[in-house]
């Protein structure tokens, strides 16, 4: 028995002796959050953490780094890139918010990067070639292990693009994989600005199909966009991981390959909070971040007597902050109802003094109010689609109840407009922001005058006037 036990130990040691480990660090949706908040987050904490890594590693990001705070916004994303350069990123892909500054804003971002910008499905519209400083993939030699990182850009840019176009992501991935396999890559990593959290029954928007179609060819998929956290999800043996938002966490993926054959063996992931007390802070990166800090934005504009959370709870799918913003918009536009995108509300409004920085962190976009007239039937279609796979909208003037089938479809949908059942053939005055107004439901809809207010301006004015009150939730209820 002792001999058998000793044999098993030696066998285990022998196997591990022929294994080599490389590490992937992953972030996404950093959105310009450069500084720690409540001792959590920031590029200085990230840099300090990765410098302590004992294995060779790559530092990767799934996009949406260019906008989200006043520093990122005022520099049109360039300060974000400079901090990522300083932190030592090796590769990123392109998110929808990299388009926030229009077509002309992309090239400077790409040119500023010391890291690889990867987007196999992003082309220049006129030439059908990859944009300057963008490539479909890059193979990194990580301590002798060939790791191919393939990028897939998000295909729904925040601002319409004429200069660029998107190809089908799975076709682009197939083409890139064929090339990296010829070049002898041992590990293929897909870096993508889409979320497994949006994947449902083979759609929305293809993420699970990567594991189904490319099992054995792709080993790791690192996603983003939905601000979700996933660890060690597996489809077809392919590891999926997502890291949340705002550099609050980073994912550490361990990849093991056979040291003799160079073939992939296994991968597993772990979420690491960027707790500054534990990670420490890279002073060089911290000083650089401080040099970018915008003066004057930390002045108090007003006070919130209670916290307005941007989180929903339980069966109620709406949040106090989203509802408050929607109410401001409906009143300002004089509409029957208002639609607000919950993804646009980045943080909660905390009780106490509120600064301009806080407001920009909550809603950093320049969206204006738009007023359209659409039918009840169109509105019903919009509401139903927005509930899957997670609620994407908040409403003022609507009450919604619904249930879900086991396969995730909406049923028993009931909608009331200002207390009255929705009428399919009735026309409603619907206000929203200019981002949502670009969706197909509003194409060709009669345009009405909503004034010249911006969503951010409404929030700031309400704060200054002391009109900060958490509305009741329960406007959207899953039964």
Image (tube, grey):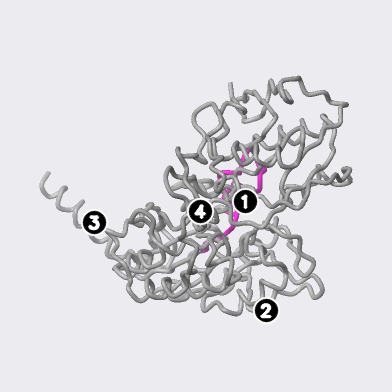
Query: What residue is at 64 percent from the left and 61 percent from the top?
Result: 153
Give how far across and how far down residue 318 sits, in percent.
57, 33
At a point 18% along the width and 53% down the height, the residue shown is 7
Name the residue at the left extreme. 2
| Residue 94, image quadrant | bottom right
In the shown orientation, is residue 102 left or right of residue 7?
A: right
**Quarter of the image that includes the N terminus:** top left
Q: Are marks 4 and 1 in contact (CB under 8 Å)?
A: no
Mark linked to residue 301: 4
Q: How many marks?
A: 4
In the displayed structure, would residue 357 be above or below residue 295? above
Secondary structure state at the residue bearing disc 3:
helix
Tag in front: 3 or 1: 1
Mark 2, residue position: 132
Q: Secondary structure at mark 4?
A: strand
Quadrant in the rendering for residue 141:
bottom left
Q: Nearer the viewer, residue 470 or 409?
A: 470
Classify mark 1: helix, strand or loop: helix
**Boundaries of the magenta span:** 188-214
Dot 1 or dot 2, earlier in sequence: 2
Front-lying residue, 46 or 8: 46
Of helix, strand and loop, which one carries label 2? Answer: loop
* Crowd tier of the residue under label 1, counting other residues whose Cα lies within 10 Å: few below 14, some 14–19, many 20 or above: some
């Amino acid at each position: 028995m002792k001999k058998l036990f000793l044999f098993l130990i030696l066998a285990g040691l022998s196997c591990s002796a022929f294994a080599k480990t490389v590490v992937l660090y992953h972030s996404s949706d950093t959105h310009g959050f450069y500084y720690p908040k409540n001792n959590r987050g920031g590029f200085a904490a990230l840099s300090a953490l990765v410098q302590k890594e004992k294995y060779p590693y790559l530092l990767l990001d799934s996009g949406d780094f260019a906008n989200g705070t006043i520093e990122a916004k005022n520099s049109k994303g360039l300060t974000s890139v400079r901090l990522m350069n300083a932190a030592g990123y090796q590769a990123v892909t392109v998110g929808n918010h990299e388009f926030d500054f229009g077509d002309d804003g992309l090239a400077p971002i790409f040119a500023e990067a010391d890291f690889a910008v990867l987007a196999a499905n992003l082309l220049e519209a006129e030439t059908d070639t990859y944009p300057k400083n963008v490539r479909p993939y890059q193979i990194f030699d990580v301590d002798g292990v060939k790791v191919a990182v393939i990028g897939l850009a998000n295909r729904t840019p925040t601002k319409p693009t004429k200069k660029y176009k998107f190809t089908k992501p799975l076709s682009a991935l197939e083409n890139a994989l064929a090339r990296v396999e010829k070049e002898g890559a041992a590990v293929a990593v897909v870096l993508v600005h889409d979320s497994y959290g949006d994947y449902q029954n083979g759609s929305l928007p293809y993420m699970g199909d990567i594991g189904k179609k490319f099992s054995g060819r792709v080993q790791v998929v690192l996603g983003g966009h939905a601000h979700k956290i996933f660890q060690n999800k597996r489809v077809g043996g392919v590891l999926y991981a997502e890291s949340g938002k705002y550099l609050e966490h980073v994912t550490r993926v361990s990849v093991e390959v056979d040291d003799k054959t160079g073939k992939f063996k296994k991968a597993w992931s772990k979420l690491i909070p960027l707790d500054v007390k534990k990670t420490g802070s890279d002073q060089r990166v911290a000083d650089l971040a401080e040099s970018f800090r915008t003066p004057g934005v930390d002045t108090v504009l007003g006070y919130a007597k209670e916290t307005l959370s941007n989180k929903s709870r339980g069966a109620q799918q709406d949040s106090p902050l989203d509802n408050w913003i929607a109410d401001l918009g409906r009143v300002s536009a004089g509409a029957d109802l208002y639609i607000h995108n919950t993804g646009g509300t980045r943080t909660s409004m905390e009780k106490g003094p509120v600064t301009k920085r806080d407001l920009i962190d909550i809603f950093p976009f320049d969206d204006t109010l738009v007023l359209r007239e659409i039918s009840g039937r169109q509105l019903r279609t919009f509401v139903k689609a927005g509930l899957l796979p997670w609620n994407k909208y908040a409403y003022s003037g609507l009450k919604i109840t619904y249930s879900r089938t086991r396969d995730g479809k909406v049923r028993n949908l009931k909608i009331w407009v200002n207390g009255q059942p929705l009428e399919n053939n009735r026309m409603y005055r619907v206000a929203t922001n200019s981002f949502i107004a670009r969706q197909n439901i509003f194409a060709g809809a009669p345009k009405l005058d909503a004034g010249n207010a911006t969503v951010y301006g409404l929030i700031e004015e309400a704060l200054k006037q002391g009109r900060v009150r958490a509305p009741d939730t329960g406007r959207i209820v899953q039964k």
